[in-house]
Image (cartoon, rainbow, N blue to C red):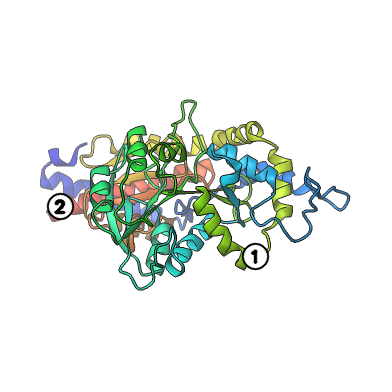
Amino acid sequence: MSFNLKSKADLYNELEQLNKIYQQKKSDSITLDLSRGKPGYDQVDLSNEMLDVLNSDSDFSTPEGFDCRNYGVLDGISSIKSLFADMLDVNPCNIFVGGNSSLNMMFDTVSHLVTHGISGCKPWFGQNVKFLCPVPGYDRHFSITEYFNIEMISVPMDDNGPDMDMVENLVENDELIKGIWCVPKYSNPSGITYSDEVVKRFANLKPKAKDFRIFWDNAYCLHDISDTPDTLLNIMTECEKTGNQDLPIIFCSTSKITFPGSGIAAMAASDNNINAFKNRYCYQTIGYDKLNQLRHIRFLKDIDTLKAHMKKHGRIIKPRFDVILDYFDREFKDINDITWTSPKGGYFIALKLPNGCAKRAVSLCSDAGLILTPAGATHPYGVDPDDSTLRIAPTFSSVDDISKASDLLCLCVKIAVLEKALDE
């Protein structure tokens, strides 16, 4: 029942009943986890055959005759560059293949701009540089920015993407704003995909800072769980149309495609940007793990095989999302001011509570054995000014555990919301 339609006495009575149930569950000493966007065991099992692709009798050469056991090929073997190019719909010459982590490549990119600058502009070091951060957003993006002492400015998100009126106004009038973080498809944590209009407005930006860059973290470009998946307009193509080809730097990886921590990361960017970063990477490495690149291309083969592989992931993930969303539909449908997203892909659901309830809900869950991402992690500096957003990650646990976790989560949220309503 809707809390605001009950008397105060009824609310106290309901809270008392919920607390009794909570104490019973707390005594069960369970351990459940909805905190991080990790693939489940059944997902990583999908790639086990890749471990047998290379053995001591294998041919370790690329079609061009390069021996992947040796030094060389700074930007990646051509076949894996072509696969990433097909993933992102860009030219292979605009791909740079790195190590196992796209987060590492993002960190390195920010580091390069801090120490050496780009486009003939002076390094960011010593300037009061600012970054735009769509919220709710990805905590690890914010951590990178904070590490380099870059000021973060929150930009609200809606169902279409970041507030572009605010983005345009800030970017086009403040020379110290040097970048923006974006997860454009199945955003972390809301799961929304940027609309065509939002992508076009990004491509039409007229930044006051010549070294402004869009950090386009397309981590979930192939991670669909619906038969009618979202589509994302190609930012590179749109920026080329407007003469802004240097604006976007796109990142992706196979971390949630094959093995997290043992995948391959890549970036896509304009000729100018790629050349600038190559000039940095040549001092860091002679070449990344080409055996891993060869292993991946022989397992994934081509874009069609890769998409078929991702459909297997989707069939595993979807029931986990469905369990949580079914609980939310049933438990929260009549409670005012609780909303949630129903994404068609990605790894997260954003749960929006009444202001002032998120930390309390997380604390209740933690005390009863359910681990959630800390309240505030979806905002810069770990501070959600409304204390209202929770990031829910359904993928790692079994369907049975997710059902138990959803039941406990809904109970704790209702207790937190009731307590807040009674305080007011």
Q: Where is residue 65 in the image (x, y as percent from the top left)?
A: 81, 47
Q: In this view, does 132 lie above or below 229?
A: below
Tell whether 292 sits left or right of 349. Answer: right
Q: Position of residue 38 (x, y in %)?
A: 53, 50
- Amino acid beneath label 1: Thr
Name the one closer to the observer, 331 or 373: 373
Tell whether 60 sits left or right of 48. Answer: right
Residue found farthest to the top: 228
User: Residue at 30% across / 49% down in the picture?
Assistant: 413
| Quadrant, the N terminus | top left
Question: Pointer 1 and pointer 2: residues touching (CB < 8 Å)?
Answer: no
User: Residue at 50% across / 35% down in the picture?
Assistant: 224
Q: Earlier in the sequence, mark 1 or mark 2?
A: 1
Residue found farthest to the bottom: 126
Q: Position of residue 114 (x, y in %)?
A: 42, 67
Residue found farthest to the right: 57
Name the one closer to the observer, 299 or 95: 95
Q: Mark 1 falls on what kind of element?
A: loop
- Amino acid beneath label 2: Leu
Q: Mark 2 falls on what kind of element?
A: helix
Residue 103, visible in the rendered structure: yes
Residue tagged 1? 285
Residue tagged 2? 422
Residue found farthest to the front: 120
Please identify the quarter of the rendering in which residue 147 is found. bottom left
Q: Is residue 349 above or below residue 113?
A: above
Tell whether 191 sits left or right of 15. Answer: right
